Amino acid sequence: MIDTLFSRQGDAARSLFFLVLFIPGIVNAQGGSWMSMPSGTSNTLGAVSFPTEMEGWAAGAYGTLLKTTDGGASWTPVNTGVSSTNGFNQVEFISQSTGWVGGTHSIIRTTNGGTTWGGAQYANDPYLRYGLAVISENQVWRVGGTSSCCKRAVFRSTINADGSISDYSSWSTTSQSTAFLLAVSFAGKDDGWAVGRGGSIVRIRNGSSPSPTLENLTSPTSQDLNDVQMLDANLGFAVGNTGTILKTTNGGGSWQVLGSGTSSNLRGVFFLDAAKGWIAGNGGLILATTDGGATWKSQTTSTSSDLRTVWYGKQGWAAGDNGTILKNDPQQILLSSGRVKVTVNWRSQYSGESGRATALPQADGFAYFYFSNPNNPEVFVKVLDFGASSPYLLFWAGLTDFEYTVTFTNVATGKALSFTKPAGSFAGGANNADLPHAVANAVLWSASGDWSRPVEGAGTVLLEESPGRALPEAGALPEAGTDLILSAGRIAVDVSWRSQYSGQTGQATPIPQKDEFGFFYFSDPGNPEVFVKVLDFGATSPYLVFYAGLTDFEYTVRFRNLQTGQSVSFKKEAGSFNGGADNSTLKH
């Protein structure tokens, strides 16, 4: 049996059996979904900062400052002594003890985790302060404008030993009469960039000198720019109204306009590195990129409120209007337009190791999870929604013999369903009764059984790179349309199916992925039904073929060796959810 094969090879060997999935046209941005967290306020929140995974801060209008010590599960208001008319719009902590908070007429600092605060309120000052960039424990930069219109303002605030604040400030009456500056970012202590209204971009040079210099940079847009982040002295991004995204690779000397795919106003930007970034915007919009902004994908959120900031550490955070706080937990996924949350816990029967799987979204109703390696997907889930009068239809299947538990939670009602697959089996399952939009009913389906076809005479798989072999003759290749060609053209896979409800039958259509694996769908390419994989460990070992499904329809999977004519078929009966494997039949 395959179980014996797995136990001989160990966990490291099994990790070679699972490969990453990419469906053309389906979202595959970095993982998880954005869940609403209870902030306890309806005030607009403009910034978040997390010095640790569990401890974080959110700042907003009317002097609102919130703190969490439990990863956002609850938030406590913090009294800073700042009047409601003087703050806030920014918060940034550089450690658990030291952080800065700023408002239009205030700047304060704590060095003891928020127990006490010191700083200044500028009650009668004509200058408005918006963006904030922390340089050190004692110094920050802020940008803004004049309340009477029409000057830019740039401030360097330093807290002195006696607690007083010294401000360097500079402003200019430019031709851009309403070009207030709204955000600022520094790469080191000397080099800063500020953006603002009318597409204005300002370069700050020699920031640590007694007299820094300001330079107006050429901007490719007249749209208001609401946020900027410079990752280093050359690479940076700015975002603004009507879907504007700008990128520079030469320190602002020139800016490229990137396609965002939206006309919504974009309010906040945050990049973890040169490739991975997020943007927050109006209407609960979160965009994500994994290729440095070349492409952007919308991620599922649980709000329609405008978002004004996004921040990322081990987890993602966004905040905005109506007290909205969102958390992006990569170990959960929201499906069905954010209405159903899915998590997976796993345990290895070989090492005893256990953990919570990480989610990677694929489509609104479909996702997969991996246990330890993002290139090795382990569990697949699907949620179908037929309206408020019908319960959600849930599917799960796995490409692992580890024990795992899948939990589906109705976000609106809090009701959760959990399904455990025992170690050593490959059973999947479905449920279309226990997770209604409102009231629960009786169980209709559940996971049961083992593989649909025993595997005879399984031997040890050699875990080594396959030697090169000649491809089959062109005439040996099957016609395109219903066959998936794997293993460098040597193996063809086809799937036939039958609905036990309508009696309809057909040949499934393949969705090629990589040389080792692919998907099939029955009628809708956005609804994958059967997953297959072929692994080749060399001429002395048979091919290892594997299948699993997210459907209760009857289907038959056939693997054919185009060089020898051998074939092996697996029939999955109607109403069942078993997967299967074979590592003895298809020989070289």
Image (spheres, rainbow, N blue to C red):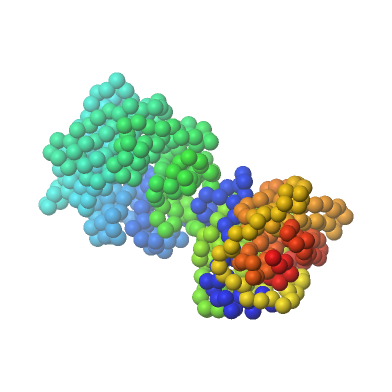
Q: Taking 387 as reference, is 197 above or below it?
A: above
> Picture quarter containing residue 17?
bottom right
> Picture quarter containing residue 427?
bottom right
Q: Taking 490 as reference, is 247 above or below it?
A: above
Q: Is residue 506 left or right of residue 463?
A: right
What residue lies at 48% left-to-right and 54% top-to-bottom? 328
Residue sitting at the far top: 175
The answer to whether one can see residue 365 in this image is: no
Q: Is residue 417 left or right of residue 321?
A: right
The answer to whether one can see residue 170 in this image is: yes
Q: Residue 265: image x %, image y %?
A: 47, 35
Quadrant including the N terminus: bottom right
Q: Residue 249: image x %, image y %?
A: 35, 38
Q: Nearer the viewer, residue 278 or 147?
A: 278
Q: Is residue 178 left or right of residue 44?
A: left
What residue lies at 36% left-to-right and 49% top-to-bottom? 59
Q: Nearer the viewer, residue 388 or 473?
A: 473
Quadrant including the C terminus: bottom right
Q: Residue 90: image x %, image y %?
A: 33, 45
Q: Nearer the viewer, residue 196 or 45?
A: 196
Q: Residue 358: image x %, image y %?
A: 52, 61
Total residue callouts: 0
What residue lies at 34% left-to-right and 45% top-to-bottom? 231
What residue lies at 51% left-to-right and 33% top-to-bottom? 263
